[in-house]
């Protein structure tokens, strides 16, 4: 990957949305909800605090996370789409 997030930002690969309903109907793109879950593929170095120290990131590469629905900036590299979000937009880490 060629994306390296700065500061307290992370790069997330969003999970795929369901293409069909439980009843088997195919959903068009216009009615699909934005994903709110994905896998962290890159993390920044952390936020710089007022006293000059750097706060370490709570998430790490490989974590499955749930993030705010309309957060971040979508970036496309090749055929893959990624979302660059701030660590504060991460709501939870999904543990196995």
Image (cartoon, rainbow, N blue to C red):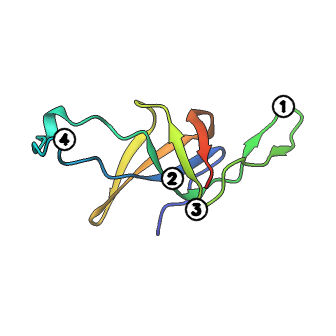
Per the model, the C-alpha gap separating discs 3 and 1 is: 29 Å
Identify residue for label 3: 62
Assess disc 3: are there few (<14), some (14-19) or many (≥20) residues with their C-alpha within 10 Å of its C-alpha: few
Q: Where is residue 31, by image quadrant?
A: top left
Q: Which residue is mark 2?
A: 11
Counting residues from the start of the chain, the first of labels 3 and 1 encountered is 1
The residue labelled by disc 4 is 21
- Viewer-nearest of discs 4 and 1: 4
Q: What crowding class fits label 1: few (fewer than 14 Cα within 10 Å), some (14-19), or many (20 or more)? A: few
Q: Which mark is residue 71?
A: none
Element on which disc 3 rests:
loop
Marks 3 and 4 in Cβ contact (< 8 Å): no
Density class for disc 2 (Cα within 10 Å; few <14, some 14-19, many ≥20) is many
- For label 1, the SS is loop
Indicate left or right for 29 with 48 as reference.
left
Disc 3 to disc 1: CB gap under 8 Å: no
Mark positioned earlier in the residue sequence (4 or 2): 2
- Residue 9 at x, y = what percent? 59, 45
Which residue in the structure is indicated by mark 1? 50
Q: In the rendering, at what x and y percent does residue 23 appear?
A: 15, 41
Q: CA distance from mark 4 to mark 2?
A: 29 Å
Which residue is at 59% across, 56% downward?
Answer: 63
């Amino acid at each position: 990957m060629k994306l390296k997030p700065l500061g307290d930002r992370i790069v997330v690969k969003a999970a795929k949305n369901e293409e069909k309903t439980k009843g088997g109907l195919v959903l068009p793109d216009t009615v699909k909800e934005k994903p709110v879950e994905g896998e962290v593929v890159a993390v920044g170095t952390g936020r710089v605090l007022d006293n000059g120290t750097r706060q370490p990131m709570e998430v790490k590469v490989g974590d499955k996370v749930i993030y705010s629905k309309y957060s971040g900036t979508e970036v496309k590299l090749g055929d893959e789409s990624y979302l660059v979000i701030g660590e504060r937009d991460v709501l939870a880490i999904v543990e196995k």
